[in-house]
Each structure stands twice: as C-alpha cells, then as structure tokens.
Amino acid sequence: MMKMSFEVTAKKLFGVNYERLIRTLFLELVVFWGLHISGLQVEIAPSILYLMSGAFSAGVMWQALSAGDNRANTENMFMLPFEGRILVFSYVAALGAYTLLTKTAGLLAVVWAVGHWSWAEILGSILCALAAIVVASCLYPLRLGRTDAYAFYVQPERRRRTVKVHHRYSVWRYLFRYLMSHKNYLVNTAAMWGVACVLPVLFGQMEARFILPVGFAILSLNTPICILLSCDPALEQAVRFLPGQQTAFCVPYCLFIFGCNLTADIIFLCSWQFQIGGIVPLHALTAATFALLSAAGSVLLEWYCPIRGWKIESDLWHHPRKYIVPAVMLLLAGLVGMFL
C-alpha cells in the first residue's frame, strides 16, 4: 500500500519511468564536474553551507506541499481506501525525494564544487537538508490546525458570490488580481525588497559605479512575476488565440514587471544613500534602464520561450531559465560599470 501511494506521487514528479529524475541527476553531475575542473574556488564557512542547505530545502518543500496543482493528485488518492499514516508518509517521502534530489542537490552540486569540504561537512549538509524537509512537513499541517492526511490537501480558493462586472477588459486588473490571489508571490516580492535593503551592507566597501548596476541585476531575479504565462496555460492559450494580444497583453505585462523591478531598485538606492551616500541622478537613470531592460527580457522569454511540461509549481520557480535575464543584466552591469 505504501509503495503504491509513493509511486502515485513520485511518477507524477519524476516521470513514469523516473526519466526526469535520471536526467536531472545527470545534469547536476555535469554542473558539479564542470565547476570542479574549472578551478573556481570560493571560501564558504561550514555554518553557511548548513544554513543554505537547510533553508533552501525547507522553502522548496513548503512550496511543494502548497502547490495547487497537487490537488487533483491528492483527490484521486483520497477517493481510494487508505490508512492515514501510510498515505502521509508516502506522500511526504515522495515530495521530500523530489526536493532533495532535484532542487537541493543542484544547489549542493555548485557549493560542493567550488569549496573544500570534508566528508563530515558534506554529510552534515545532507543531514541539514533532510532535517529541514522533515520540519517543514511537520509544520505544514499545523497551519490548518489538524494533523490527519487531509491537512495535506490544498483547498481550492473560495470565490466571492458577488462579482463586480466590468464592461471593458483590463490586463492591469488581471495582473493585480492574480498577484493578490497568490500571496506567495507577494512574499517573494517583499523578500526582494528586504534584499535591496541589505545589499548596501554587503557591497558597501566597493565603488558605487561598479556595484550599483550589479545590485540592479540581482534585484531582477523576481521569478514569480516573470512566469505568469508559463504557470497559467489557459491564460496563455487565450492570449495567443485572440488577435492583437501580443501588444495588448505584453506591453502592460512589461510595464507591470518594470514597476516591480523599479520599486526594488529605488529601495536599494535609498538604502545605499542612507547608509553610504553618494547617489546621483545618473544612478537613478541607470536603475530605471536596468528595470526596463530586465522587464522586457522577461516578457520576451515568456512570449517566445514559455516553460512547458512542468509537473509542480516549484519546477517553474527553480527552472534554469530564471537565470537568463539576471545573467545578461550582470554582463551589462560589467560594461556599464566601466563607463559610469
């Protein structure tokens, strides 16, 4: 019974024959070996390694447990006779294996490759990841005040009985409604604002003309707002089906991401001014330019290269495509820093 319950979730995440898991592990091995033979070395304290491993694993596990696309899968399991403990253990074990082998393993592959670690430290990082997964699994049901198997069922959002009718469509209205109905997107955006406040502390010893563009590039890594078409296939189909939507949808969407990016950049500049000083109008213009270019790049990727074939929302949040725009912005930051 437990094996069958485990395979129901595991095959959804890893593929019928676990082909997605094999492919992911192979890519992680390639990343590790490529960085290892490159000779790149970074000094990282073991405590930071343990913190990264635990915090990242807990976040991914919580996101996997909260994913709305798991609803159909859990509904099918609840329709069959089951024993609560067995179902919970197998379901959590499958999501935990997904978190550890496809997400945390990627992070550890990079960190292990660029640092000198003993076997005890490597084992410690794995144990921290496992402990974080277990803790997240234990805390998740408590948010509903229950501990049975149904606590892991993601409830569908309740809709209001009275809906205000608008006679004209509005992409802006849709974007803000979508953002407000997905609180985790708001949390991620607030986290980027927190990063914007902290960056001057980390980069304060460097010259502003070199490091400010780097900060703008880092703050463009707001994944959730850059995957709205990928995470909603029905919306993408409707947008592509209707005539003239390439401009009608993409322009407001680009301005929406631009506003989010610019807000984070402004917080970064204000924090820099309060802590270090020396901000001039040229820096504000650079912030607006980086915010607009990163927004345009994100929308172009969504329109021409949407992410398809994902199994769980976490696949979208951690897809390698998320690094394309920030990487291009970092290259641009290097060029800008030479001329500012």
Image: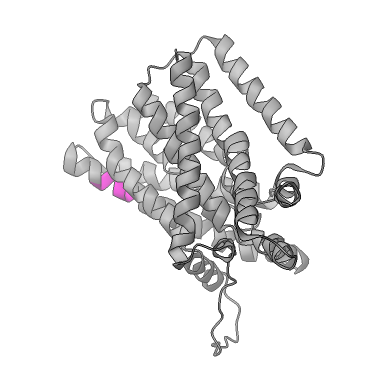
Across and down, in percent, residue 84 comes to: 62, 60
Indicate whether residue 133 is drawn in magenta.
Answer: no
Across and down, in percent, residue 74 comes to: 67, 61
Chain part drawn in magenta:
266-270
Q: How many marks?
A: 0
Q: Quadrant of the C terminus?
A: top left
Depth check: 108 or 329 in front?
Answer: 108
Q: Residue at x 77, y 43 (%)?
A: 15
Depth check: 195 or 100 in front?
Answer: 100
Residue 149 shown left or right of residue 284 in the figure: right
Main SS, magenta residues:
helix
Depth check: 319 or 75 in front?
Answer: 75
Residue 46 shown left or right of residue 83 in the figure: left
Q: Residue at x 61, y 22 (%)?
A: 31
Across and down, in percent, residue 236 comes to: 70, 61
Q: Is residue 315 visible?
A: no
Asked if residue 145 is positioned above or below residue 3 in the image, the reply reads: below
Q: Residue at x 42, y 43 (%)?
A: 219
Depth check: 108 or 178 in front?
Answer: 108
Q: Is residue 322 visible?
A: yes
Q: Residue furthest bottom?
A: 162
Q: Residue at x 29, y 30 (%)?
A: 203
